[in-house]
Image (spheres, rainbow, N blue to C red):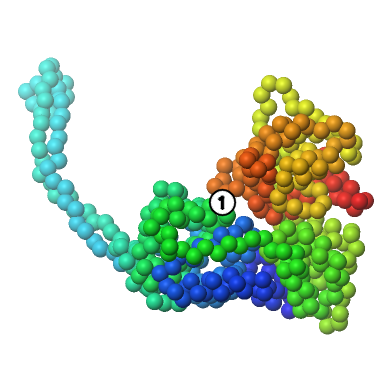
Amino acid sequence: MKARDVFTPGSSPTVTFVSRHLEKRKEIFLDALDQGGILVNISGPSKSGKTVFVRNLLGAANMLPITGAGAATPADLWERVFHQIGTEIPAQRHQQTSTDLALEASLKASGSLLVAKAEGTGTITGTFGESCASSFQKVTDHLQLLISELAGTDFVVFIDDFHYIPRDVQRAVAAEIKEAIANGVRIVCASVPHHSEDVLRANPDLRGRVVTIDFDYWEPGALSEIADKGFAELNVHTHQAAIRRLALEAAGSPQLMQSICLNACYEAGIRDRSETPVELPSNNNFIQDVCVRAALGADYSSTLERMNEGPKVRGSERAHYRLKGGDVGDVYTIILRSLSLDPPLLHFRYAELQDRIRKVCEDQYPPGSSVTGACAQIAVLASGGLDRMIVEWDATEDALSIRDPYLLFFLRWSGMLNDVGDELLRQRRLS
């Protein structure tokens, strides 16, 4: 067996599928589908394993995954379903006839209407009877076709990223979802936490007909099971301390843990199952080289550049501070370097962030108002105008949250925060 078939960051895992900590969610999910007339709404952060969870419960053959992205009408969603199950969409032909085309022309005339050169002018008006036949296709009712095709079957429509559907379209989609589930179509929606109630806001009548299953990032122990199962399948021995470090770097994301473990295999030259036991290196340099390699697949370079540069400066330049290591940086650079420090965390209270800032700065620090203002701007800059929140600043709680573990991982291991790209990695190796 090949390493890429064991650790599968880009597809559903088989050997390394871990479900022990998901048993209660599994029970709730299956009971909701069995009950019927219920919309299952799965809420969880990006890369937390929502899609894998559903696919492993239903089986790939029964799951009809579609995305809310790019849907301008409910019909756009259902056509994606029909495409997967091979349903032909019936159409009707209609005739349209156009008659009585009016024409008014102003011509110069002299003796004959067809003579162009003349003195004087005249006006001709008239109606010409002409029949023009044209045809077009009018698609039949998509909702009723969805019900007739899927009601009472084992198929489950899985609408991922419901929050990507425009708000005005969400209302129409939610109304049709309500009608579909009432008629026996099984539907599951998935969204990120801060959009978990979008489907209910779109149609309050769904309240009482929705079962919400909340996902969260995985604990390090559950992530470690991915490594334990995969390395054992490849006949690779690993130290638990090293696996624990890799699990901490994955920051709760099973998908990222799969990527890190696969890159650990590549870094050690392990691409197939070994006939004899192989010892995976566990020293600091090896683990750091694995993380640098894995960061190549988590490219957030343009996002990080926007966050590091901050908004356009108006008036006086930003204050710069001397940083440990000899270089200088403004409040944006300081905050991002603070987020990249050990241990890897996705959520920072103001006091925790200030503690990290003191570890980054040599002697003087940005004032509190500058830090909170920069945090708010970083959250805006990180999204880059997209309809998704990868960094959030909660002004009421004074807390900064990174919503995508891949962003944190890239922040820690890409080396982009330094004038010399590998300086941060060098410092981490020395620590």
Does residue 327 show up?
no
- State the image coordinates of residue 294 (x, y, percent, origin top left): 76, 59
- State the image coordinates of residue 56 (x, y, percent, origin top left): 59, 74
**Number of numbered discs overlaid on the protein picture:** 1
The residue sitting at 42% across, 52% down in the picture is 202
Amino acid residing under circle 1: His
The residue sitting at 28% across, 59% down in the picture is 138
* The N terminus sits in image quarter: bottom right
The residue sitting at 26% across, 56% down in the picture is 136
Residue at numbered disc 1: 194
- State the image coordinates of residue 109 (x, y, percent, origin top left): 11, 22
Q: Viewed as shown, does residue 12 lie left or right of 270?
A: left
State the residue lying farthest toward the left. Answer: 111
Q: Viewed as shown, does residue 398 lie left or right of 65?
A: right
Figure quadrant of residue 176: bottom left
User: In terms of secondary structure, where does tag 1 sit?
Assistant: helix
Q: Nearer the viewer, residue 91 or 313?
A: 313
Figure quadrant of residue 257: bottom right
Does residue 304 show up?
yes
